[in-house]
Image (cartoon, rainbow, N blue to C red):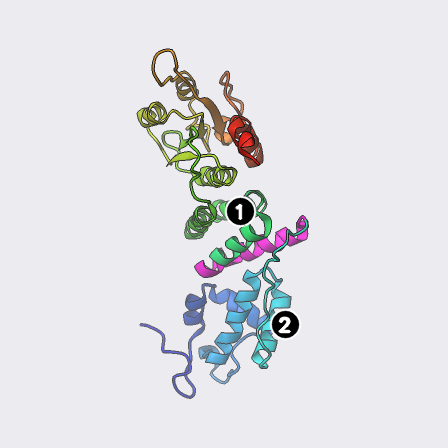
Amino acid sequence: MDELPVGTEQGTGITTGGLARRIGVSPTTLRTWDRRYGLGPADRSQGHHRRWTAQDVAVVEEMCRLTAAGLAPAEAAQLARKHLEGAPPVVVPAPRAEPDPPPTAAALEREHRGISRAATRLDSPAVQTLLTEAVDRHGLVAAWQDVMVPVLHAVGRKWEEAGDRYVEVEHLLSWHVSRTLHRATPAEPAAPLPPVVLACVPAEQHCLPLDALGAGLAELGVPQRMFGAAVPVEAVAAAVRRTGPRVVVLWAQARSTASLPLARHLADTRWGVRGARGKPAVMLGGPGWAGRIAGGTLRPATLPDALARIRRLYPELAAARP
C-alpha cells in the first residue's frame, strides 16, 4: 500500500520505511542518523510506529543533499539541524570561471564520497549534478581519470564484496557517467580528416573508456566513428575498409576478450585504389591486452597518453592552428 502524503492531517506522516524508499537510503541509515545526530522524527510519542512530518523529511533531505555534495555526515547533520531552525539552506559553491588549482587528495576523496553516496541512494539527479560539476571543475580528461574511474572502481568492488548486491547502483552510475561524457562532447569537427574508429572487441561489453576517449578526441578536433560494445570481427573490418581511418582503437577489458589475431588482421587491412592504398595504426586499449604483444600496435597506459599518441598522428591539426 502506498504511504500517506506527509503531513496531510495532524498526527499523520510517513513511516521510516516509506521515507527510506522515498529518499533512497536504508531504514538502518535513518535510524543511525537519528541515534548519532538527532535527525529523527520530532514526535516520539508513538513508540515504534513513529511518523516523520514534513519538517522532519525536509531536514533529512537536506542531510542527503549535503552528503551528496561531499560533506562528512557529522558536518552535514549539524547544518541540516540549522535548516530545521529556519536557517537558509547551505549553498554549495559553484565552480569558478577561472581554472581551479590542482585538487588535493582530500578534495577528491570528498567528491568520490559524494558521488558514491548519491549512487547508493539511487539519487539520479544528484549523481548527474555532481558528475557534471566534476567535468566543469577539472576538465573532461581529469574528471574521467581522477573522479569517474575511482568511483566506478569503488562501486564495482562494493558490488563484488556484497555478493551481487548493489548491481543496480553500478548500472545507474555507469549510465550517468556515459551521459555526462556524451553531454560534454563537442560537436563533430568540420575538418575533412580521416577518422579514428573506436570499437570494443567481440564479446566485450565495457565501452565507457571508449566514450571518454571519444570525448577527448572531439576536444582535440579529431573526427571519430564510435561503434561501441561487442563489435563482431566482420563488422570492425568492414567499418575500417569503408571509413579509411587513420587509427583504430580496440578496447578489451578482460583477457578472455582480447584477440591478437583481430589486432593483426586490422593492422594489415588496406583500403583505397591501387597505388594509393592506406592502412590504419592500431591502438590496443584496456587491461585485457596486458602482457600481450602485437607488433606495430600502439599500447597507451592512460587516457592522456592515448590522446597524445593519436594527436601526433594528426599533424594537420598543428598546421591549422593560427
The majority secondary structure of the magenta stretch comes to: helix
Which is nearer the eye, 208 or 309? Answer: 309
* Location of residue 239 in the rendering, given as x and y in whole percent from the top left corner: 34, 27
Tag 2's secondary structure?
A: helix
Residue at coordinates 57% horizontally, 42% vertically from top-left?
145
User: What quarter of the picture does the C terminus occupy?
Assistant: top right
Is 104 in the magenta? yes
- In space, the residues marked 1 and 2 are separated at their CA atoms by 29 Å
Identity of the residue furthest to the bottom in this view: 10
Q: Could one spot residue 306 in this view of the protein?
A: no
Is 111 in the magenta? yes
* Location of residue 251 in the rendering, given as x and y in whole percent from the top left corner: 45, 31
**Is residue 306 placed above or below 169 in the rendered structure?**
above
Q: Residues within 10 Å of mark 2 (few under 14, many from 20)?
A: some
Q: Name the residue under label 2.
A: 78
* Location of residue 60 in the rendering, given as x and y in whole percent from the top left corner: 52, 71
Which is nearer the eye, 17 or 140? Answer: 140
Residue 148 numbered tag: 1
Residue 61 numbered tag: none
Residue at coordinates 51% horizontally, 28% vertically from top-left?
316
99 to the left or right of 319 = right
Identity of the residue furthest to the front in this view: 322
Residue at coordinates 55% horizontally, 27% vertically from top-left?
312
The amino acid type of the residue labelled 1 equals: Met
* Location of residue 18 in the rendering, given as x and y in whole percent from the top left corner: 41, 71
Labels 1 & 2 near each other (Cβ < 8 A): no
- Camera-near label (1 vs 2) is 1
26 to the left or right of 136 = left
Magenta region = 102-126
**Is residue 282 placed above or below 204 in the rendered structure?**
above
